[in-house]
Amino acid sequence: MRIAVIGAGWAGLAAAVRAKQLGHTADVFEAGQVPGGRARRVWSRALDTHIDNGQHILLAAYTETLALMRELGLDPEALFYRERLTLQSADGHFSLSSLPLPAPFNLLGGVLLARGLAPAEKLRLIALCARLRQRNWLTTPSLTVAQWLAQGAQSPRVVQAFWRPLCVAALNTPPDEACAQLFANVLRDSVGGSTAASGVLIPRTDLSRLWPERAAQYLEFVEDSGEHIEHYPPSRLKLGHAVKRLYASTAGVEVDGVNYDAAIVATNTPSAHRLLSQLTPATGSAEYLEALSRFDFIPIATITFHVEQAWQLPHPMMLLREAPEQLEFGQWLFDRSMYARQTGATPASGNAEDTAPALLHVVISDARAMMAHAQEDVVSAVARQVQMQANKSGTRAPICGHHVIVEKRATFAARPGLTRPSNQSPWPRIAVAGDWTDTGYPGVLEGAVRSGRLAADKLIKNRLCAEV
């Protein structure tokens, strides 16, 4: 089959790679100039180097992403900095690290040895996790994370130091809004899994090099013999092409006037709604489009600071104590010198070696409150926040530059009761893919990869069955 994939984010690329692996042609249409979607490399004029359009981490439990990377000939062990799950505050007031023990003792031991919690608080935290495990990681339907924590008698200090950072980092939704079941799913596959699965993976290279660029090369690779599956031409990645028109019939699909056997719409939900609304109504299509229109989105901000000399923090990823009333919105501090490959970049090549500046990344999940203030005021306040808290472990070199990226539609709001569409649309020749589909995960990169691979599998299977 000849398949059109609309969108070259992680979901679209995963779908296209899967389609080619199964022996089909996949043309990928991408409005931007760089593959990767919201997880890609961008050029910062302010810092004169490449940075990511947001700091991302993955969990070692993200099996589909790791499998895809290996299938593309990449070595995750070389491309990720791996460590045990650790929550360590930059000011030294709180520290919790899972231990190299079989589950559930890895988290149990970490909680018992945690600094900054009273013995009674530790026991209630352990009891809540134990009850969740006994219930097979199922919560009461329609429960928020805050309600679940209240049922577990978690103290305000434990919520602020442990649960809230985990919830906002995993779901980009605050505990009083976030779906408890989605949060439980993340806990199940991380702290509830094996010791290896509970690890945290920080990309050592930029997100485009992590695997999207290799996927693009794979899609356009042609064997020396020049032979292709059936009579189809090789796959193509069409950057800078924003799809305007989608048409589907019982005979095939047209994407901007080009004929295909089927299509996978792997965009965000507003774009998917715009494209699918052009199609002739089908059974269930009104309800499907209505579900797409119900998504709300929450922004994430990343402030990258250039420092005169690498800070060499005690830990590569550290918690920051928030003070929103003082515009100190920083939540996580990443010291890139602790984990990144020292490869710099130029706008033309991106391959210069050993020239990368010393960078810090400050992540502000659920950045709605931050966006209500002047950006320069927030940057000044967060710089002060970072310097004051990091200086607890030693004097740090001055900050000499910054770059702010705000992803306004970073993730969907992961609230209870949200209906998420399946991969198969009401139109037989159209599938959809994205972290917003019904993956069982919140809006994370693993969900995007899982959705893309599943969309390709289902679409191809359904079309082959229909043609028999």
Image (spheres, helix red, strand yellow):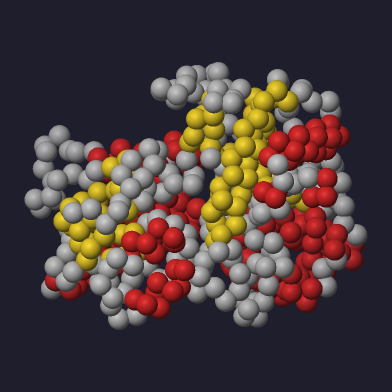
- Percent x, y for residue 436? 48, 63
Against 99, is 48 above or below? above
Q: Position of residue 164 (x, y in %)?
A: 74, 59
In-front residue for pair 184/424: 424
All told, the count of numbered labels is 0
| Residue for point 22% across, 66% down | 248
Q: Is residue 305 something that shows in the picture?
A: yes
**For residue 437, what is the image quadrant?**
bottom left
Residue 232 relative to residue 365: left or right: left
Q: Residue at x 25, y 40 (%)?
A: 220
In this picture, residue 466 sits left or right of residue 322: left
Q: Which quarter shows the N terminus? A: bottom left
Q: Residue at x 47, y 68 (%)?
A: 293
Decide which of 277, 430 is in the foreground and name it: 277
Q: Quarter of the image containing the C terminus?
A: bottom left
> Where is residue 194 drawn, in percent x and y?
60, 59
* Residue located 18% across and 44% down the image: 234
Q: Position of residue 432 (x, y in %)?
A: 36, 63
- Tell me if I can see residue 342 in this picture: no
Residue 359 horizontal side relative to residue 327, left or right? left
